[in-house]
Image (cartoon, rainbow, N blue to C red):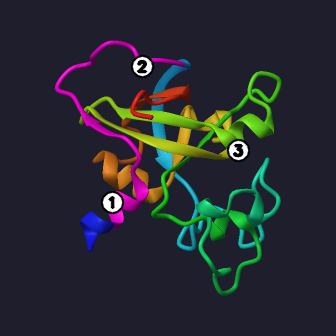
C-alpha cells in the first residue's frame, strides 16, 4: 500500500549521494523547513484559509475529498499525502496563476532525495527562520524532520516530459 501511495504522490524521484549539476530551471533557495496543513495540524485554526487558493476547485489535486469534521478552512482540508509547499512567494515575480500551474523541486540536503511539490500557500512566517513549510507526506518521503535543510527550486520543469 505504501509504495502505491508513493507512486501517486511523486512525479520525480531522484537520490544523490552528493549534489549534482544545477537543476534545469528556476531559482534556488536553501534553508530549514517544517510541516504544515492537513486535518491533524493543530498549528492552524480550524477556519484558516490559504493565501492564494480560495476554493478547492482552483487546485482540487491538493485537497481531501471531504472537509474534516470540526473545520471549515482550506488549510485543514489539504491532503497531507500530497506533496505541497508553502514559501514566502513574491507575487510580483510569481503571480497566483504561475503558482497554480508550476511545480517546485524540493531536495533534502541530508538525504539527497529530490521530489516535486505543488505550491499551496504563502508562508512560513519570517519569525520562524525557515524558508518553507511542506506537507507531512513530503517531509516523510524526503526522510527529514522539522528544521532539516532543503534546497527549493522554483519554477521547476523536469526534463522527463
Mark 2–mark 1 Cα distance, whole angstroms, equals 23 Å
Mark 1–mark 3 Cα distance, whole angstroms, equals 22 Å
Label 1 SS: helix
Q: Give the number of callouts.
A: 3
Find the residue positioned furthest to the top: 21
Q: Position of residue 126 (x, y in %)?
A: 66, 33
Q: Position of residue 39 (x, y in %)?
A: 57, 73
Q: In front here: 146 or 7?
A: 7
Over which residues does the magenta segment extend? Answer: 5-25
The numbered dot on residue 23 is: 2
Quarter containing the N terminus? bottom left
Residue that appears at 75% across and 55% down: 50
Residue 118: within the magenta?
no
Residue that appears at 55% across and 55% down: 36
Residue 12: within the magenta?
yes
Q: Residues within 10 Å of mark 2 (few under 14, many from 20)?
A: some
Residue that appears at 52% across and 22% down: 29
Q: Residues within 10 Å of mark 3 (few under 14, many from 20)?
A: some
Find the residue positioned furthest to the front: 161
- Circle 3 sits on which residue? 100
The numbered dot on residue 6 is: 1
Q: Main secondary structure of the magenta part?
A: loop
Quarter containing the C terminus? top left
Q: Position of residue 8 (x, y in %)?
A: 40, 61
In the rendered view, would you say 96 is above or below 74? above
Mark 3–mark 2 Cα distance, whole angstroms, equals 21 Å
Amino acid at each position: 500500500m505504501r509504495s502505491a501511495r508513493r507512486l501517486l504522490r511523486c512525479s520525480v524521484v531522484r537520490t544523490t549521494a552528493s549534489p549534482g549539476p544545477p537543476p534545469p530551471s528556476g531559482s534556488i533557495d536553501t534553508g530549514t523547513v517544517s510541516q504544515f496543513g492537513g486535518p491533524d495540524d493543530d498549528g492552524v485554526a480550524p477556519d484558516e484559509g490559504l493565501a492564494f487558493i480560495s476554493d478547492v476547485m482552483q487546485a482540487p489535486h491538493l485537497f481531501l475529498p471531504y472537509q474534516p469534521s470540526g473545520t471549515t478552512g482550506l488549510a485543514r482540508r489539504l491532503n497531507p499525502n500530497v506533496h505541497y509547499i508553502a514559501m514566502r512567494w513574491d507575487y510580483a515575480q510569481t503571480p497566483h496563476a504561475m503558482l497554480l500551474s508550476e511545480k517546485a523541486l524540493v531536495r533534502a540536503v541530508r538525504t539527497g532525495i529530490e521530489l516535486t511539490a505543488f505550491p499551496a500557500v504563502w508562508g512560513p512566517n519570517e519569525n520562524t527562520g525557515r524558508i518553507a513549510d511542506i506537507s507531512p507526506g513530503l517531509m516523510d518521503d524526503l526522510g527529514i524532520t522539522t528544521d532539516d535543510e532543503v534546497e527549493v527550486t522554483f519554477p521547476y520543469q523536469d526534463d522527463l516530459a
